[in-house]
Image (spheres, coloured by chain):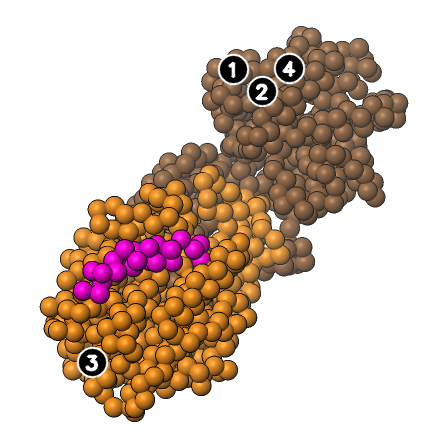
Chain colours: A orange, B brown
Amino acid sequence: MASLKKFREWIDQHRADLRDDYFAFLRFRSISSEPEFKSEVERCADWVKEYLQASGFKTELIATQRYPIVYAEDLHAPGKPTVLIYGHYDVQPVDPLELWKNDPFEPTERSGKVFARGAVDDKGQIFYAMAAMRALKENGGALPINVKFCIEGEEEDGSVGLSGALSKIQQKLKADFLLVVDHGAYDEKTPAINLGARGMLTMDVKLTGSKSDLHSGEYGGIAYNPNRALVELLAKLYDSNGRVAVDGFYDDVIEPSSEDKKAFAHAGDAASYAREYGIEALGGEKGRTIQEANLFRPVLEINGIGGGYHGPGFKTVIPAMAIAKLSCRLVPGQDPKKISRQITDFLHRHCVKGMKLDVHVHAGAPAYRANPASELANAVAAAAEEVTGQPCKRVLTGASIPIVASLSQTIGAEIVGMGYGLPTDLIHAPNENFDFSRLEKGLLTVARAMELLTQGAKR
Amino acid sequence: MASLKKFREWIDQHRADLRDDYFAFLRFRSISSEPEFKSEVERCADWVKEYLQASGFKTELIATQRYPIVYAEDLHAPGKPTVLIYGHYDVQPVDPLELWKNDPFEPTERSGKVFARGAVDDKGQIFYAMAAMRALKENGGALPINVKFCIEGEEEDGSVGLSGALSKIQQKLKADFLLVVDHGAYDEKTPAINLGARGMLTMDVKLTGSKSDLHSGEYGGIAYNPNRALVELLAKLYDSNGRVAVDGFYDDVIEPSSEDKKAFAHAGDAASYAREYGIEALGGEKGRTIQEANLFRPVLEINGIGGGYHGPGFKTVIPAMAIAKLSCRLVPGQDPKKISRQITDFLHRHCVKGMKLDVHVHAGAPAYRANPASELANAVAAAAEEVTGQPCKRVLTGASIPIVASLSQTIGAEIVGMGYGLPTDLIHAPNENFDFSRLEKGLLTVARAMELLTQGAKR
């Protein structure tokens, strides 16, 4: 606890600076998906670079096909392991703006919370990781281990730049451990480390029935309606037990062991989902628990459907085409390429005669699982327990982090995810917010984890 | 033929005026569904009123909750029947504007065709009917029968004003015959009169699964996706023979007699649909001909579906809700209210547990059939045959004309539809066009039909 005490004191002495720097970071309108904010995204990258430089890091902006990656290193702990810390300085769009209670880029405090786009995701979280380096250095003169930062500028827009640059910079990014500071806590009191995510596969499905939209009176009874063909086709994707009906879909699934089911906690239960989202938790396969259905079983979702006119009023049209956006969440054992072929074949086999079917598969990424007993996992969990006084949960996520999976694979590092986000933070939504107490917990956890990690040898 | 000759001569003498007036009419941007054109719609109504007044009619603008109805009458043929001529002076929107080769409100001639929004629908057609009155008067000093005009300003936006005013003005509109000048020819050479339309019913279906959109990774396997619930529900609406699976849907359908099947011609065949629209004509019930499926059988269409994100790129969302727009085309015997109840019950019975289902039924209208041997039907058909030299086809439409059905019912008139529109005129689409030869055929047909109708007695 001695170690924590000195960090707590450091925070007390630097609280005003931390706040100013955090707010300065939040003020950049670094929305990566909207081209009009290009210069703000770039200025934000400069700010991150300067912050790390002022913390004594050797820094560099790595140009990509889109936004620069902020790379920084402090490698003055010979014989000690190297940690690569990953995060992002870009943020989600802010629409609908009218639902915000303040300008999303003018951080505003209400009831102890800071409201701003990026307050948590990921500016808040990557900021406490950067600040933790200052706390470490100013308490010992140097970092106890070797640290690299890779902070990208388009995580919210597909990580295109980092994906494209990965093979070129893999030597530079090489590390023993990869710490992803872009995750959530287990609940308000309980910390968590993340040790795996489901894989992902996305595809577009388009059915074309005619050269142009047709009047549904003049052609009703003649033309086969693409909307009808689409609902008939997509309904076939599921059987009556809620299983995906695509042939072979589950063939390669590695069933979770009972150890796995015990090892990984799941925060949600049916009652909490009903309360918070008004849903009955009936979306999975019959006979599976929520934990299994969300973490250990693959799913196929129809993320979007659209055909004809579906706004206010009415248009009696038989549309020329109808489209759907499908995605899968995959589990260990499943190969995205094989699954995409199986689904494509299934759709072609079941599509009604006379309809033109186009299936476009986007890139996929397999599921990944971290070593739950890695030195980094143990260090972060122990640090979080010291900071919060609560046992740290080990969790998986049903979501996917495609870039992180390929990043850890490319550089061959053991991966751990951490963070103090909560569902009530409203990330990606209006009125995103974070509080200083969790920002401080994050700072303390990162700083202390680095110290604990020095107990490990260079690998 | 003597009668036609004098009208042809009248056209020859007035060709420049006809063209100027037609073009002046087309220049009004009378788009009823777009509020920014309000004053243009109203100025257009004034122009129509003045044109009829200058033709010796007693005219009036009948205010409605939205746009005025131009009412006109010339009732100086005692003992002769009264014809009410219906049409509309409003037009469809012009989007997408970039596909037009000229300003849609600056009529432009190319290869003998006039390109403009409303060139046919319905300015072109109602214009030749009005001009026919001048030709009649200037060739005999007075109309041979009694004529009323009811030209509304929001046919393209649901006829709200006329519907609301109907009961108040039914005495004023009273007539023996209702001539609807808003239809098409059978083909380029062959004229047609329309003697019936399918009824109509529209409804909105909404499935709500949660309070807000959910992340499809975090909640995939937990939340039941409303898109999935929607496609599963809508797919149940059809059986494997292409019949509507809603219980009782066909119970009240009056099967067409073999006389009916012979009496009503149908222009389209499978080859023509394949050629013109790239469709295979597979949309109807198995075992029915195209004529039956389009004219004598009811259909249920999914005019629109929408849920989640379906634009460019991808959003891995489980939407809070998904919606569909359904419509039926009904045939004689079917009651829109009963059918809407049957469909609503069916949807509620088959909707998956845990999903909130809302069904909103809009107004419906039953099918109608005109007397194929009415004096007006015989007069218009005979006139069209004189004008074109071709036998006139008697047709039904698979489409619906809700206001006309209730108009004829309210005023108790025998109804006939006529017109010289063709599919290649691109009504409702960019580059709508008409040609002077068909405009003149229309004028001659209306004028001659009025003469032939005088042979009938007052009813």
Residue behind mark 1: B169
Q: Amino acid at mark 3?
A: Leu
- Which numbered disc, 3 or 2, marks the residue closer to the eye? 3
At 30% from the left edge and 72% from the top edge, which residue is drawn? A133
Q: CA distance from mark 2 to mark 4?
A: 10 Å
The residue carrying pointer 1 sits among few (fewer than 14), some (14 to 19) or many (20 or more) residues within 10 Å by Cα, namely some
- Which numbered disc, 4 or 3, marks the residue closer to the eye? 3
Q: Position of residue B173 (x, y in %)?
A: 56, 16
Q: CA distance from mark 1 to mark 4?
A: 13 Å
Q: Amino acid at mark 1?
A: Ile
Callouts 3 and 2 on one subunit: no
Label 4 marks a residue whose chain is B
Give the magenta-colored segment's residue range.
A9-30
* Above or below A264: residue B159: above
Check if mark 4's residue and mark 3's residue have beta carbons within 8 Å: no
- Which numbered disc, 2 or 1, marks the residue closer to the eye? 2
- Which numbered disc, 3 or 1, marks the residue closer to the eye? 3
Residue behind mark 3: A452
Residue behind mark 2: B69
Do we see residue A183 in this rendering? no
Callouts 2 and 1 on one subunit: yes
